[in-house]
Amino acid sequence: MTQRSIADLKKGERAQILKFLQNDFAAKLHTLGLKPNETVEMVRLSPFGQAMYLKINDQFVALRKEEAHSVIIS
């Protein structure tokens, strides 16, 4: 089974966060509201596709695509 990350989400798609691949980066993501078992929704990509705008608990967060690959979802 292939693991999916936030970077795999399509516009409007929701998923539950399972874990982080980079422990050192996980602390930064926690401060942004990305925590295991939280539901994340992909709102849209930036104009050049380098960042993703996400909705988590009624808050909006921008995350770089390369960072999004380190957040594993169900």
Image: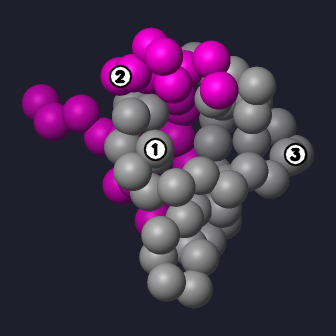
The residue indicated by pointer 2 is 21
- Rendered residue at 69%/22% (across/down): 30
Up-down relation of residue 12 to residue 30 (above or below): below
Residue at the outermost bottom position: 47
Pick the quarter of the image with the C terminus: top left
Up-down relation of residue 71 to residue 13 (above or below): above
**CA gap, disc 1 and disc 3:** 21 Å
Using a 10 Å C-alpha cutoff, classify the residue at mark 1 as few (fewer than 14 neighbours), some (14 to 19) or many (20 or more).
some
Please tell me whether mark 1 sits on a helix, a strand or a loop. Answer: helix
The image quadrant that residue 72 belongs to is top left
Nearer the observer, 72 or 39: 72
The image quadrant that residue 53 belongs to is bottom right
> Could you tell me the amino acid type at mark 2?
Leu
> Could you tell me the amino acid type at mark 1?
Glu
Number of marks present in the image shown: 3
- Rendered residue at 80%/53% (across/down): 60
The segment highlighted magenta reads: 1-28
Q: Are marks 1 and 2 in contact (CB under 8 Å)?
A: no
The image quadrant that residue 71 belongs to is top left
Q: Is residue 3 magenta?
A: yes
- Rendered residue at 44%/57% (across/down): 65
Up-down relation of residue 44 to residue 54 (above or below): below
The residue indicated by pointer 1 is 67
Nearer the observer, 55 or 12: 55
In the picture, the disc for residue 58 is: 3
Q: Position of residue 52 (x, y in %)?
A: 57, 62
**CA gap, disc 1 and disc 2:** 10 Å
Residue at the outermost front position: 24
> Could you tell me the amino acid type at mark 3?
Asp
Q: Position of residue 38 (x, y in %)?
A: 66, 26
Query: Nearer the observer, disc 3 or disc 2?
Result: 2
